[in-house]
Image (cartoon, grey):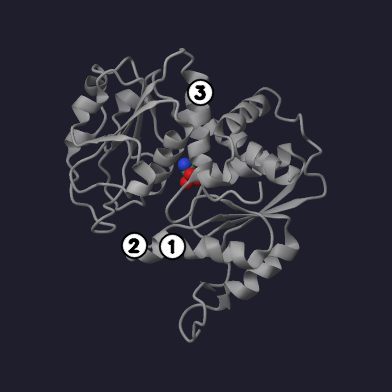
Amino acid sequence: MKKFLSVHDASSIHSLIEKALAYKVNPLKDHTLGKGKRMGLLFLNPSMRTRLSTQIAAQNLGMEAIVFNVGQDGWALEFEEEAIMSGTTVEHVKEAAPILGKYFDVLGIRTFPSLKNKEEDYHELYINQFVKYSGIPVVSLESATVHPLQSLTDLITITETFQEKRKPKIVLTWAPHVKALPQCVANSFAEWVNKWGQAEFVIAHPEDYELDSRFTQGATITHNQDEALKNADIVYVKNWSTYTDYGRIYCNDPKWMLTHKKLEATNRAKVMHCLPVRRNVELSDEVLDSPGSLVTQQAANRVWAAQVVLSEILKS
Ligand code: CP
């Protein structure tokens, strides 16, 4: 594996899941694989789970991981080609990225979308400029449009939780939120579940919250959450802002919050959320605090997703 920016960099999802679960059983089985190697973790935006789990994963492989909160501590970066840098940006990625490429063997980057300019966000300028100019393997720690380490984690969690022979019914349901959030987690979850192909997959959201069909193709899409939840085995809850009329909040109908009552229609479904979560806005306390909530297990599995991706990069 030369980079990890999306599901397209995963040649076999099944194999990644199996290897990740093997790391979960024996975290230090490859503890010398990354000996003498260094990973840079660049955060242009906040993080708890991604930052810590990737550091732990690197350490488990014997790598040193150094975190740089660029958005907080670094010079303001310019990403546009041929920019006239007479504004607020101080350093161009054309200088910064090659330097980071000399300091590190692998680079992890977290960037968020502007949610103002769809074309620019979906062009993934920030992370692609690091790929272009760093000269070393780049791992997405969440970009403008996808969050592949989260999605791999989600499939690891579903695989270890759902052990029946039949395919699970997985429902990705939109939930209300007070802020306009990126479509990354939903886009990414949809494209990973679709490529995995081991589920009956339904996406439920209010009208006007359609995601880009490049990610959702293969899923059944409905505006009726109650209908979608019938006989669900896994319910994945996530807010996203509008894609078509980009980055807006049209509907914040509290009816879309997942409650215990709604789960009665499911097949005693397990509930997932990538976190952080707004309690009693996206999900009710009773759901999050119930044994059916997988959110802690899911967040803990972030280590194994990061570890298998780093090990594949180190091996290649
Ligand atoms: N789910 C997730 O990526 O969490 P953080 O933003 O805390 O890294």
**Which residue occupies 40% across, 66% down?**
120
Give residue 80's position: percent from left, percent from top: 49, 75
User: Is 184 positioned to the left or the right of 3 in the image?
Assistant: left
> What residue is disc 3 on?
159
Instruction: Determine the image quadrant of residue 17.
Output: top right
Disc 1 to disc 3: CB gap under 8 Å? no
Amino acid identity at mark 2: Lys
Give residue 205's position: percent from left, percent from top: 24, 39
Amino acid identity at mark 3: Thr
* Foreground of the two, 21 or 302: 21
Give residue 121's position: percent from left, percent from top: 40, 62
User: Is 145 positioned to the left or the right of 305 in the image?
Assistant: left
* Foreground of the two, 92 or 191: 191
**Which residue occupies 74% across, 52% down?**
38
Instruction: Determine the image quadrant of residue 92.
Output: bottom right
Q: Residues within 10 Å of mark 1 (few under 14, many from 20)?
A: few
Residue 118 — which label? 2
Instruction: Residue 121: tell me if it is visible.
Output: yes
> What residue is disc 1 on?
123
Give residue 300's position: percent from left, percent from top: 55, 31
Instruction: Residue 276: tell me if it is visible.
Output: no
Instruction: Determine the image quadrant of residue 116.
Output: bottom left
* Foreground of the two, 260 or 16: 16
Amino acid identity at mark 1: His
- Residue 163 lies, with reference to residue 276, above or below; the image says above
SS class, disc 2:
helix
Q: Residues within 10 Å of mark 2 (few under 14, many from 20)?
A: some
- Residue 104 lies, with reference to residue 80, above or below; the image says above
SS class, disc 1:
helix
User: Is 130 positioned to the left or the right of 191 in the image?
Assistant: right
- Structural distance between the alpha carbons of marks 1 and 2: 8 Å
- Structural distance between the alpha carbons of marks 1 and 3: 32 Å
